């Protein structure tokens, strides 16, 4: 049987209480769920994802990121502030220049795994 969106579903409704309780236990003891949701929301916006992808192997300034994403400097600055607040990107100053890069290896790995999944 399929629902209205052509997704296969069970023909009968039987709940495995033991499996449900185990799954609920793992969710109820996970205070990071909301933080994880915020990261996925941030990465779900195309300009922010383009910024992250551009920074995977590069350290770029706001002007560079503006050119790469075909966005205004103001728009890129706003997106970078959101990404920085979530600790997805970091910056360093060099004289009058500010360069951005990926904050840590976790973000790099996350993006690489998503890319691999999409390519399969």
Image (cartoon, helix red, strand yellow):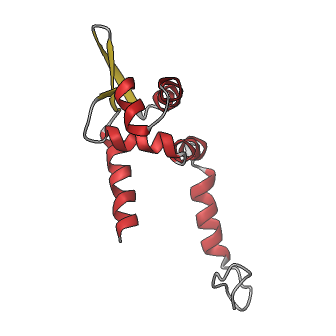
The x and y percentages for residue 7 are: 64, 81
The x and y percentages for residue 66 are: 42, 30
In the rendered view, does 108 fall on the left or right side of 36? Answer: left
In the rendered view, does 58 fall on the left or right side of 100? Answer: left
Residue extending furthest top? Answer: 95
Say above or below: 41 vs 7.
Answer: above
In the image shown, does 72 or 14 lie closer to the viewer? 72
Q: Residue at x 53, y 28 (%)?
A: 75
Q: Residue at x 54, y 41 (%)?
A: 42
Q: Residue at x 47, y 24 (%)?
A: 73
Position of the C terminus, as image quadrant, is bottom left
Q: Residue at x 36, y 58 (%)?
A: 115
Numbered disc total: 0
The x and y percentages for residue 85 are: 50, 27
Position of the N terminus, as image quadrant, is bottom right
Say above or below: 6 vs 44.
Answer: below
In the image shown, does 69 or 59 lie closer to the viewer? 69
Say above or below: 113 vs 9.
Answer: above
In the image shown, does 73 or 13 lie closer to the viewer? 73
Say above or below: 92 vs 38.
Answer: above
Q: Find residue 61 and report its image quarter.
A: top left
The x and y percentages for residue 91 are: 35, 22
In the rendered view, does 103 fall on the left or right side of 15? Answer: left
């Amino acid at each position: 049987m399929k629902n209205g969106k052509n997704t296969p579903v069970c023909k009968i409704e039987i709940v495995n209480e033991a499996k449900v309780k185990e799954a609920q236990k793992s969710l109820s003891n996970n205070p990071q769920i909301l933080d994880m949701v915020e990261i996925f929301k941030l990465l779900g916006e195309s300009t922010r994802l383009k910024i992250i992808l551009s920074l995977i192997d590069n350290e770029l300034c706001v002007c560079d990121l503006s050119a790469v994403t075909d966005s205004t400097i103001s728009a890129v600055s706003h997106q970078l502030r959101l990404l920085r607040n979530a600790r997805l990107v970091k910056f360093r100053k060099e004289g009058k220049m500010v360069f951005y890069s990926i904050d840590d290896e976790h973000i790099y790995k996350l993006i690489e795994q998503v890319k691999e999944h999409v390519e399969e």
